[in-house]
Image (spheres, grey):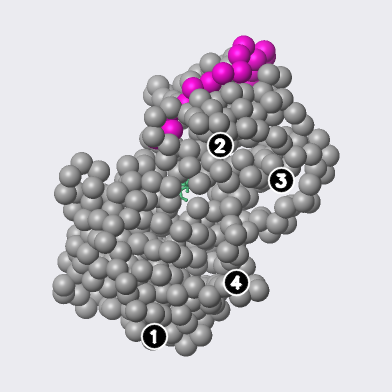
Amino acid sequence: MELLHLSQKSAFDTVNIPLPSSKSESNRVLIIDALTDGKNQISNLAEARDTQTMIRLLQTNPPVFDVLDAGTTMRFLTAFATVTNQNKVMTGTPRMCERPIGILVDALRSIGGEIHYLNKEGYPPLAIHGLNQQSQKQVKIRGDVSSQYISAMLMIAPALPLGLEIELQGKVGSQTYIEMTLQLMRNFGIHYTWEENIISVPPQTYQASSFTVESDWSGASYWFSLLACADSGQIFLKGLKEDSLQGDAAIVEIMDRLGVKSNYKEDGILLQKKAVSGLEKWDFTHCPDLAQTVAVTCAIIGQNSIFTGLESLRIKETDRIFALQQELSKFNAQLKEIEPDVFQVIPSVTMPNEVKIHTYDDHRMAMAFMPLLTKTKVIIEDPDVVNKSYPSFWKHCQLADISTQES
Ligand SMILES: O=C(O)C1=C[C@@H](OP(=O)(O)O)[C@@H](O)[C@H](O)C1
Ligand SMILES: C=C(OP(=O)(O)O)C(=O)O
């Protein structure tokens, strides 16, 4: 499928969305499961391609781990293959081979891991030759590039003969994902301490346990945005809980200011419209995956806003800042860098009759621009890109009575 035509629709009755499961939680419990002695009871694993790739690679254990475009799968399996002393080539899509991994490789090498770059220093593809003897337990990792390096090291730490003492250096981004990792490790019996910038994990064994993966808050954000942009309606998001491991639950507070009220029910959240109270400024350091959703929402509903904490967006599935700037300009909105690392969303003043969205091999570009259909006809290029995290996304649009036509 090359193009998906979404017809304009601005009013919704009650829409029920059976959200997908979180790929972040899924990929962590899969690594923990692979390191556990005994049998875990894990349910509700994500349908996301990133998770299905992780499952397939762990089950079939091929000599080459091709992770496609899955960042967590690349980073978590690199640490896993090293600690389990495997010979493995790690590779992925051309874009994956442009996403840095040097900080993780340096950390693994510093404790005795043998890893070589097969092409460009600091980037996949990699050749891993395991870890024969752990040379030390102290590692230093800078925190401002990707939290996934830290999560990867944390999950293997209990399985190392000396454990790990990780010193986080500088500004730490996506900290909520580090907290998710630690809470999941605790669920499987792991003890750790986190004092100031040092996380210590002694050597110990993961205890077999049970875990049900929660619904995905990042995927939920597109439905909050749809309602924020719509004239009327209500949306029920099944499976979300108030007390979540996921930092992207921050969408509740953001969207409360952009005109969406969240009412927690026993088995999910009912979203309803309310007056906009305003989002003058937001820092996305700890919830970078929400930035596209919120930028598009502000641009559509006329909310002028200042965004910070977008630095990591440049090294994700695409350069998301560039991609947003290009696509927002198609309906006369802007994401303007007004000072280094400070961006202003300048909303649209005139809406064309039709907008064609290029998606840059980035699932979140496709999903974030969907709510534009509340104002105009939208054409999404390469709509299957959503499979990375939310394969049923367009089917769920049909549940919302949005007409979708392929060409
Ligand atoms: O650990 C995780 O599951 C993730 C961490 C974040 O990445 P960074 O730590 O690179 O910001 C996030 O953007 C990504 O979608 C998932
Ligand atoms: C950045 C993302 O994923 P990853 O880094 O795991 O590829 C994402 O899902 O938005």
As measured in the structure, the alpha-carbon distance from the residue carrying label 4 to the one carrying label 3 is 23 Å
Q: Which residue is located at x 19 percent, y 49 percent?
A: 337
Q: Closer to the N terminus: mark 4 or mark 2?
A: 2
- Give the label, 3 or 2, closer to the camera: 3
Camera sees residue 123: no
Q: Position of residue 375 (x, y in %)?
A: 28, 78
Q: Secondary structure at mark 4?
A: strand
Name the amino acid, label 4.
Gly
- Give the label, 1 or 3, closer to the camera: 3
Q: Closer to the N terminus: mark 3 or mark 2?
A: 2
Q: Which residues are magenta?
A: 126-145
Say if the magenta span includes residue 129.
Answer: yes
Split into 4 quadrants, where in the image is the C terminus?
Answer: bottom left
Relative side of 62 to 6, left or right: right
Residue matched to label 4: 268
As measured in the structure, the alpha-carbon distance from the residue carrying label 1 to the one carrying label 4 is 20 Å
Residue matched to label 1: 232
Q: Secondary structure at mark 2?
A: helix
Q: Residues within 10 Å of mark 4 (few under 14, many from 20)?
A: many
Relative side of 147 to 36, left or right: left
Q: Residues within 10 Å of mark 3 (few under 14, many from 20)?
A: some
Q: Closer to the N terminus: mark 1 or mark 4?
A: 1
Residue matched to label 2: 151
Residue matched to label 3: 187
As measured in the structure, the alpha-carbon distance from the residue carrying label 3 to the one carrying label 2 is 15 Å
Name the amino acid, label 1.
Ser
Name the amino acid, label 3.
Asn
